[in-house]
Image (cartoon, grey):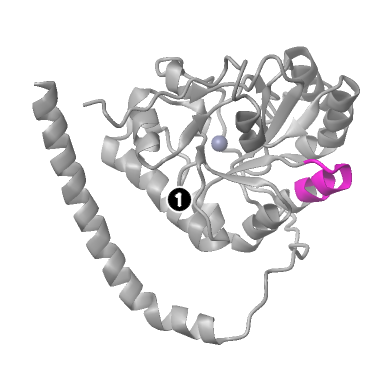
Amino acid sequence: MLVSRSIKGERRAMKKLILVTLVLIIALGAWGSVIITYATTPHTIPVPTPAPIPTQPSQSKELPVTPVDSAKGNIVYHGSSSLPEVALTFDDGPSLYYTPQVLTILHQYGVHATFFTIGENVRLYPELVQQEYYAGHVIGNHSWDHPYLTQRSAASVYSELSRTGDMIQQTIGIRPTLFRPPYGAINAQVEFQASRLGLISVVWNVDTRDWDQPRSTESVIINNVLKGVSNGSIVLMHDAGGNRSRTIATLPKIIVALRQRGYQLVTISQLLSDMQTGGTGYMHVLTKDVA
Ligand SMILES: [Zn+2]
């Protein structure tokens, strides 16, 4: 039975692959002239420029949901418990209003972080994602439009993640390898679809609750970090999706406080590569052979 299901699954996957390839061929044909024009036109590496700041930030998308543990074995919650490293992560961006401010602060303090971007925002503000990437930050996949992926079909989950991966690749030239589920809502199905796309699912173990506005004051946000942080912590913050003025206000204080406690601030990629031995938080299981 397992073998039979596996073969059927492979056939379905192969059919899907063929379909995707055909669509890509058609799309490439349509874009061929654009690409040729671009290739033959003098161009330079994008230079980071300050984005205009709108006066009204968009409304919040975040809701208080903690990561589901049903697929815990395949999901990264934190880095090595024996290394004094902490990863700051910023979800839901980019946004014209807050992302440039986050980038400025990170630059001022010499911090590299991880941005889990939403596909439709990457399409809107590609130059901000390029600024993040060229500043040395890591770009992750946060789905196309921030749905509860646990309520979607396998095909829909795959589409959300692949479409976003395509958009990020189109924007910065490489595909993301890290995925954060919107709302931290993840199960074995979502993790499996992510792994099919070569994505490691990353949640967090320290929630600043900066999304909980106006309840989370600046002191609450800082305290949420300091009371929850330990070696290998992954800290959840947001640079879009609502009023993030307190995220901006607290970020310098959080950076200083964490460094005073002896933590080095790293990207998720750095966190994962540093925990080759001795870590307990990362237990990614190869699922491609599972029916
Ligand atoms: Zn989010």
User: Above or below — where is 280 with respect to 50?
Assistant: above
Is residue 216 or residue 77 the one in the foreground? 77
**Residue occupying the point 39% across, 76% down:** 31
Q: Position of residue 112 (x, y in %)?
A: 74, 42
Answer whether residue 187 is visible to the viewer in this image: yes
Q: Main secondary structure of the magenta part?
A: helix
Residue 106 located within the stretch drawn in magenta: yes
Q: Which residues are magenta?
A: 102-111
Residue 271 image point, x, y percent? 65, 30
Asked if one can make out residue 96 in the rendered structure from this viewpoint, the answer is no
**Circle 1 residues within 10 Å: few <14, some 14–19, many ≥20:** many
In the image, is residue 11 part of the stretch drawn in magenta? Answer: no
Ligand 1 has an atom within 8 Å of the beta carbon of the residue at disc 1? no
- The quadrant of the rendering that contains the N terminus is top left
The x and y percentages for residue 83 are 73, 20
Quadrant location of the C terminus in the rendered image: top left
Above or below, 186 relative to 246: above
| Dot 1: element | helix
Tell me the quarter of the picture where residue 156 sits.
Answer: top left
Q: Position of residue 58 (x, y in %)?
A: 63, 47
Q: Nearer the viewer, residue 109 or 275?
A: 275
**Can you tell which quarter of the image residue 195 is in?**
top left
Q: Quadrant of ligand 1?
A: top right
Q: Please tell me which residue is depicted at 57% across the width and 33% down the height of the picture.
A: 62
Residue depicted at 72% across the width and 14% down the height: 228
Give the image quarter of residue 248: top right
The residue carrying mark 1 is 164
> Can you say whether 244 is above or below 202 in the image?
below
Residue occupying the point 64% across, 59% down: 130
Is 193 situated left or right of 67 in this image? left
Q: Amino acid at mark 1?
A: Thr
